[in-house]
Amino acid sequence: MEAHGSGRLLSRKRRKEDSNGEAEEGQRPGKVPRCSVGLADPAPFSDELESNGSTPYLRVSMEEAQKGTPPERPVRVYADGIFDVFHSGHARALMQAKGLFPNTYLIVGVCSDDLTHKFKGFTVMTEDERYDAVSHCRYVDEVVRNAPWTLTPEFLAEHRIDFVAHDDIPYSSAGSDDVYKHIKEAGMFAPTQRTEGISTSDIITRIVRNYDVYVRRNLQRGYTAKELNVSFINEKKYHLQERVDKVKRKVRDVEEKSKEFVQKVEEKSIDLIQKWEEKSREFIGNFLQMFGPEGALKHMLKEGRGRMLQAISPRQSPSSSPARERSPSPTFRLPFFSRTSPLHGVTTTDPISEDEEDDEE
């Protein structure tokens, strides 16, 4: 395993450009045993594996493959492509190829830049980047670098391929209406389904459609106008647009904050009005309890008036209380007048008490 891991690390070294601009590769690692790796490691490249040409190779039929082959003899399925801007559509196609049979060993061929630029067009990713992206897909067991554009019998025999997996739509290229026509006629074709709504062309179309947005984003991230192939005038235009957008974002933020502020003020005003209503009801109730027809103030006034009346005219003593004995009032008589009333001509003679006589003497 150590030799296998070290060989893979050496093979992953990127090409370094020397002073003359020529690319030179790192030292080619030694061969490693052919085996299926786990999910913890990327898939190995075919030129790094030991050849098993010593044993004869016989293709399995579709019936045998569908029933299941022994563990030491998996069904070898081959799927090829460009795999530029590796996306979920690529991964789903490889997943279908891996799941075609109960015991499948998936080999994926990736075409080089020269073939791709010649027959299909310019790519976004380099061939090394595309090789590395495919090798890290969990469904891939082996990667063939610099895969051929058209599959020849010699290539199929070299890699001991049982079936070729691809979508069933005729693929016209390299002067042929369908490059997989001879594979289909040989009974080695296993169709898969395309994932609708996503493809490398769709992703590139999105980038082209939003070109200005992505250029402005990369300018903000530190890329130079020269690296982006943008003229001086366009660079200034993009910077001006960015400033205008910043002002718009600030205005939008102010509007949102003002809306939030108004909403909070409305909520607080509603709460305040509700509290005022509750307090007003409480105040009115207390006022009525104090000053209403049967309020506490009326009872207080009645009680106060009763106390005042009682203080002014106290009640008579009860009849059952013992009567006080009064001394008789003394008889008052004028000494120089007779006892005859001048009005009626009646003479009244009152007996003079001994005390009065003594006083006169």
Image (cartoon, rainbow, N blue to C red):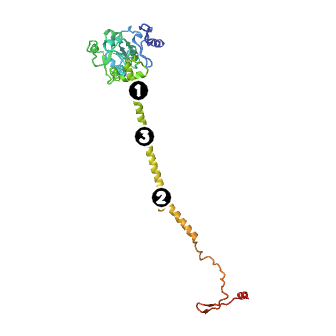
Residue under circle 1? 243
Helix or strand or loop: what does disc 1 sit on?
A: helix
Return the x and y of residue 43 as percentages of the image width and height: 41, 16
Q: Residue furthest front?
A: 336
Helix or strand or loop: what does disc 3 sit on?
A: helix
154 to the left or right of 44:
left
Q: Residue type at mark 1?
A: Arg
Q: Residue type at mark 3?
A: Val
Residue under circle 2? 288
For the residues carrying marks 1 and 3, which lies nearer the camera in this image? Answer: 1
Answer whether residue 112 is visible to the viewer in this image.
no
User: Crowdedness of circle 3 by 10 Å Cα count: few (<14), some, many (20+)?
Assistant: few
Return the x and y of residue 271 as percentages of the image width and height: 45, 46
**At 33% from the left edge and 11% from the top edge, which residue is drawn?**
115
User: Crowdedness of circle 1 by 10 Å Cα count: few (<14), some, many (20+)?
Assistant: few
Helix or strand or loop: what does disc 2 sit on?
A: helix
**At 48% from the left edge and 13% from the top edge, which residue is drawn?**
2
**Badge number at residue 262:** 3
User: Crowdedness of circle 2 by 10 Å Cα count: few (<14), some, many (20+)?
Assistant: some
Residue 210 image-quadrant placement:
top left
Answer whether residue 290 is visible to the viewer in this image.
yes
Q: Residue type at mark 2?
A: Leu
Residue 119 image-quadrant placement:
top left
